[in-house]
Image: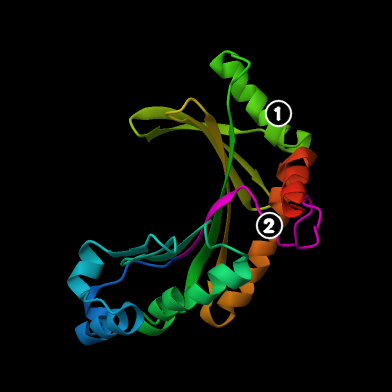
Amino acid sequence: MNTVFKHIERKIYAQTFLQQVDVRLEYNSLQRERIPEEDVISFFNNHFQIEANISTLLEDGVFLKDNQKQLAFLFSSDAAMLSVGHLNYRSFYDSVLPNVYHIKDFVFNLWKQQEVTAAIRKVNVFTMDNNINLAEDDFHSLLYETVFSSEFLQLASKATTWEIDGNSIMVQNRSVDEVLFRTYIIKRENGDYSLFLETILSKKEVGQTLEETLEVMNLILYDAFHWSVGANIIAIMNKEEQK
């Protein structure tokens, strides 16, 4: 049970800053001899009406994407992942859980795994323009102060560097009650700055209780988001809801 995040009554906002939700199931790397070729072929035919064999699965992985629905799947020898974009997203229950069936069937029925590490990753993006012409470092600080709560900003962070589109991006990592908060800023081609907030939670789970566990994890991430951002961000979400 978390001790930091205040429980927030769940509600569906008409518009949020949420851009993407991923559910990932990880397991020990599998061997070719563990599963018949015909079972792999049958799985992808039945679920996605595509042809994929065990060699492709183990060597390259199988990636499927529907751009119109903003829905993607990745299957490999050690992980299966579902990704849902923001355009058709309504709620975790409505937009994510119905699609969990595909990766659950892959992991627990095809691969016959008993335990996996289940992870949820949510990506929120806050975009602002630097119309007051602050120095870049100062504007980055202003962005953080505008978006995040004082409690969040008081947390110690660990910095790492990512390469994104050929640019070195500083990533800040903060952890509270098993939730990882990952933040970074990307400057867009039009000059705007986008502050990314990734919230990630992982749990060991058994297949029979996967959906229930994911729902509980999602509620924790819901509370974690509300704890991490300032009251002004929630006010914007509420204002949008009333339009």
Residue 97 percent location from the top left of the image: 55, 73
Give 198 or 110, whichever is nearer the viewer: 198
Classified by dominant secondary structure, the portion drawn in magenta counts as: loop
User: In the drawing, does residue 97 fall left or right of residue 64?
Assistant: right
Q: Position of residue 165 (x, y in %)?
A: 35, 34
Residue at numbered disc 1? 145
Left or right side of 47 for 91: right
Q: Is residue 184 above or below residue 216?
A: above
Q: Give 242 or 193, whichever is nearer the viewer.
A: 242
Q: Residues within 10 Å of mark 2 (few under 14, many from 20)?
A: few
Q: Nearer the viewer, mark 1 or mark 2?
A: 2
Can residue 226 be found in the magenta stretch? no
As drawn, which residue projects farthest toward the front?
A: 243
Q: Secondary structure at mark 1?
A: helix
Q: Position of residue 188 (x, y in %)?
A: 46, 30
Identify which amino acid the numbered label 2 is placed on: Ala
Answer whether residue 188 is visible to the viewer in this image: yes
Residue 14 is tagged as 2
Looking at the figure, which quarter contains the N terminus? Answer: bottom right
Tell me the amino acid under the disc marked 1.
Answer: Glu
Say which of 112 and 70 sits in front. Answer: 70
